[in-house]
Image (cartoon, rainbow, N blue to C red):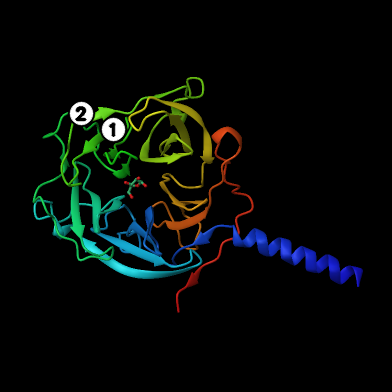
Amino acid sequence: MKKLLVSGLLSSLLFSAASSADVLISERFAADPSAHKFGDTYYVYATNDQDNSGEYWDSTEWRLFSSKDLESWKDEGSFLHNSVFKWADKDAKAWAPGAFERNGKYYFYAPVGGNQIGVAVSDNPKGPFVDPINKPLVEKPRDKNVGAEPIDPAIFVDTDGQAYMYFGTRVPKVVPLGNDMVSLDGEITDVIVNGYPADDEKKKYGEAPFLHLHDGKYYFTFSTGWPGQIVYATGDSPLGPFEYQGVIIDYLDINTNHHSIVQDGDKNYIFYHDKIKEGGSYYRRSILMTELEYGENGTIQQIDLENRYLKYRPVR
Ligand code: FUB
């Protein structure tokens, strides 16, 4: 009897650990999750690693996944090809996207190749998307101060309605967007992060910026490089400056990392990629998600990578 009780307790403990553990959102290889909740559905816009050459991130289309409950996931297919951008090179690589919903329209921000970011719009999160401006939203060398590579766009809209796009490698960049969400409304400036761990180049900004607001503080999160930790810095304005705080996801056994955060009521979730699935590699990555928790004084608790319980459940 005592034994039964103990094993019952153990399995319920295991079950509750599993329910907050890492969920694999697809059996397909995909990366660079831009996760959102639109209405009652979660969507993840992603880089399509399954169909690249296996030797580089050279897919030319983006993939979409959806879920009603964050437990079971549906593959919505390759919903957008770079050919939607008529000005783009036909072999231009479809890299880490961003997305945003505003006034019933869905905006998709996409690095095409390493020098341009395009924007596409749709009435439906699954598309079809069209290019409303017929030119890159950001382009090197057309625009000043885009940095080494204008890639990895992420959108944040502040409480006053002002939208910002974060992007860039090696030096993080930010630019205000117009109310139409498809024009720039100011200069591209550098995002300043102070207080990095003492002179450790590896801890500095690499790529994959993201911004969110929690309890009145602005959290600037990013990957520190190749390989990268996902770290966070906080500030009093979406434009910074930010003060380095610590690590959210430590180095994984892979040369890139890329994340996004979904706020859903009082729950928060982090989506990221790893090469954890069988057959995985630097170019064949898998998207995972888990709960993100805040500690005291607005700290973010580091994700426990030792005890990941991986599961994948398709929508039937
Ligand atoms: O998927 C190609 C590139 O790898 C992304 O743009 C980076 O963020 C890195 O994840």
Residue nearest the viewer, comparing 111 with 244: 244
* Whole-percent x, y for residue 272 in the image: 45, 51
Residue 190 shows in this picture: yes
Nearer the N terminus, badge 2 or badge 1?
2
* Whole-percent x, y for residue 201 in the image: 44, 26
* Whole-percent x, y for residue 150 in the image: 24, 39
Residue that badge 1 annotates: 173
Residue nearest the viewer, comparing 268 with 112: 268
* Whole-percent x, y for residue 260 in the image: 41, 48
**Residues packed near mark 1 inside 10 Å, few (<14), some (14 to 19) or many (20 plus):** many
Q: Quadrant of residue 160?
A: top left
Query: Given the image, on which type of amino acid does mark 1 rest?
Result: Lys
Residue that badge 2 annotates: 145
Residue occupying image coordinates x 42% and y 56%: 285
Q: CA distance from mark 2 to mark 1?
A: 8 Å
Q: Are marks 2 and 1 in contact (CB under 8 Å)?
A: yes
Quarter that holds the N terminus = bottom right
